[in-house]
């Protein structure tokens, strides 16, 4: 979903599913905060042709996978620029400053040696071959929403696939380029009365969300975004193009469905099995802080017992007056949320102090949840914990205490709990590397502050739920946490795929498997 949008949530009081404006591991390495030095005498002439916006499932125009020869003088940027249909940006090139930006402005100071804006899969292959030949670290960028800025890097090559955003639909299947943004995907599918289970942030790239799993309001009814993938076009570290599916290179296909982003290759396109774009029933329930513990207990029962047609996330916000806001936003895919709201209230043991019900069409819901059709760049700090099962009383007290401490300190902070279960608990046909099929929920720790106070809040949150945590959600990756905590029981299969498809560890960062 999205930081549903964290911004919209915090501003308008709408609780949301957060799997989106942190689109995560479509990218690769930890950005250094030290700006790189611009290469001398290597300014590349900008291409005069505009990037195309069509992506096909099977990359066409595939160049030779042999890498260009490295010279003693260093990378030949003019040669690379001349070979691309897209654009190459160097620090001395007009447009470079905007070209390397991510969603979070905190990473603006990180300056890649160069940025390739690919126009087609062949450009992706050329960039990978060039980086490999010149011993450059390459990081892919789709939407650029990674929490740790993983799609930029100092002294390396940033590969932007944002122009690969073409879409087509036939017989229930969406074919889409890896750079497409979520709002555009939903708007396109709405023409056909179809949808996808995705996050909500409108500007998140489909690649990052999907490769890390992809949670949202349809998670319990239809599963994760990655579960709907039928096939993928991917370029591996050797520059070769693959079209992977359950019947073609199934090990790579399964590895990429759920935690493969940044580890194994650059995905250029997807085919998704779509879902019906039906009307949705919504409820919003608010309780006073005095009933916070009861709401958490009741919400946990709701997450375990509600029908798979029902989803609802719990929002615990630190208010500027030192108190807590306790809210649940719920959705029913039946189109009527009345029974779901009543069930949650019965589990809490108290009627909500504020209560609203509504029905929205597919696109009304997309705009409501995403806060509109786009999202402005925003600074933030965030992290996550995956709940193995229901928290006990001590852990609930600690969770609420972590948010309360932030409120008293004047730190804007939220703990957002998104339920799993239902269809998301089932491994899809073709396999998946999503490691949390048996988990209850994912907690996102989020603060629009970015300094010590925000980090203190996130650290306090981790400590509070440590006994109930199975690990972290890879789409909410954060610094200072072990890689293994994001991959759980899938780590060994991912490492086997890594050894097979990237034996030289070309795609390497502190957030990838080695």
Image (cartoon, helix red, strand yellow):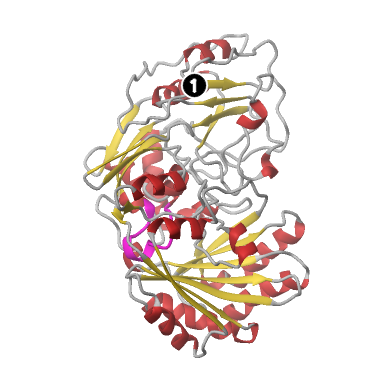
Residue 58 is situated, as x and y percent measured from the top left of the image, at 30, 30
- Residue 363 figure quarter: bottom left
Q: Please tell me whether residue 224 belongs to the stretch shown in magenta.
A: yes
**Residue 433 appears in the picture as rendered:** no
Residue 355 is situated, as x and y percent measured from the top left of the image, at 52, 80
Residue placed most toward the observer, 186 or 307:
186
User: Is 493 situated above or below 452?
Assistant: above
Residue 434 is situated, as x and y percent measured from the top left of the image, at 39, 55
Residue farthest bottom in this picture: 349
Magenta region: 213-225
Residue 358 is situated, as x and y percent measured from the top left of the image, at 44, 72
User: Is 328 situated above or below 276?
Assistant: below
Position of 29 with respect to 168 (left or right) is right
Position of 453 with respect to 348 (left or right) is right
**Residue 74 appears in the picture as rendered:** yes
Element at badge 1?
Answer: loop
Crowd around label 1: few <14 · some 14–19 · many ≥20 (10 Å): few
Q: Which residue is mark 1?
A: 50
């Amino acid at each position: 979903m999205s930081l549903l949008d964290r911004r919209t949530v915090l501003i308008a009081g709408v609780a949301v599913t957060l799997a989106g404006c942190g689109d995560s591991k479509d990218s690769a390495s930890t950005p250094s905060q030290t700006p790189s030095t611009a290469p001398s005498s290597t300014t590349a002439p900008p291409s005069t042709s505009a990037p195309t916006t069509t992506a096909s499932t099977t990359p066409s125009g595939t160049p030779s996978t042999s890498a260009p020869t490295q010279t003693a003088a260093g990378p030949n940027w003019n040669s690379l620029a001349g070979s691309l249909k897209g654009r190459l940006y160097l620090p001395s090139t007009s447009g470079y400053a905007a070209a390397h930006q991510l969603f979070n402005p905190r990473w603006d100071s990180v300056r890649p040696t160069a940025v390739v804006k690919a126009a087609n899969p062949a450009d992706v292959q050329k960039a990978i071959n060039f980086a490999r030949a010149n011993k450059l670290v390459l990081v892919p960028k789709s939407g650029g929403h990674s929490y740790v800025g993983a799609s930029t890097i100092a002294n390396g090559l940033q590969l932007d696939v944002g122009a690969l955003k073409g879409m087509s639909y036939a017989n229930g299947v969406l074919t889409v380029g890896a750079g497409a943004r979520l709002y555009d995907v939903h708007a396109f599918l709405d023409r056909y009365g179809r949808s996808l289970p995705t996050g909500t942030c409108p500007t998140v790239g489909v690649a990052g969300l999907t490769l890390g799993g992809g949670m949202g309001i349809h998670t319990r009814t239809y599963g994760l975004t990655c579960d709907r993938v039928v096939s993928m076009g991917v370029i591996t570290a050797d520059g070769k193009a693959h079209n992977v599916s359950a019947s073609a290179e199934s090990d790579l296909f399964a590895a990429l469905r759920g935690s493969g982003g940044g580890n194994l290759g650059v995905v250029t396109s997807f085919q998704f099995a779509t879902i019906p774009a039906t009307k949705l029933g919504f409820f919003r329930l608010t309780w006073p802080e005095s009933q916070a513990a009861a709401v958490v207990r009741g919400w946990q029962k709701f997450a375990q017992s509600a029908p798979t047609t029902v989803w609802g996330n719990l929002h615990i916000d630190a208010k500027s007056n030192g108190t807590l806001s306790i809210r649940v936003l719920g959705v029913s895919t039946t189109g009527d949320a009345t029974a779901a709201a009543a069930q949650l209230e019965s589990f809490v043991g108290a009627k909500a102090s504020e209560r609203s019900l509504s029905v929205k069409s597919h696109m009304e819901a997309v705009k409501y949840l995403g806060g509109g059709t786009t999202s402005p760049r925003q600074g933030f700090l965030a992290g996550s914990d995956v709940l193995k099962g229901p928290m006990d009383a001590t852990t609930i007290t600690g969770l609420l205490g972590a948010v309360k401490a932030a409120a008293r300190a004047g730190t804007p902070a939220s703990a957002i709990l998104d339920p799993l279960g239902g269809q998301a608990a089932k491994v899809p046909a073709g396999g998946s590397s999503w490691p949390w099929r048996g988990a209850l929920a994912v907690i996102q720790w989020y603060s629009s502050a970015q300094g010590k106070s925000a980090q203190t809040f996130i650290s306090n949150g981790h400590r509070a739920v440590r006994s109930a945590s199975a690990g972290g959600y890879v789409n909410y990756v954060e610094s200072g946490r072990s890689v293994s905590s994001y991959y759980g029981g899938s780590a060994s299969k991912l490492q086997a795929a890594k050894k097979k498809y990237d034996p030289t560890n070309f795609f390497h960062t502190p957030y990838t498997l080695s």
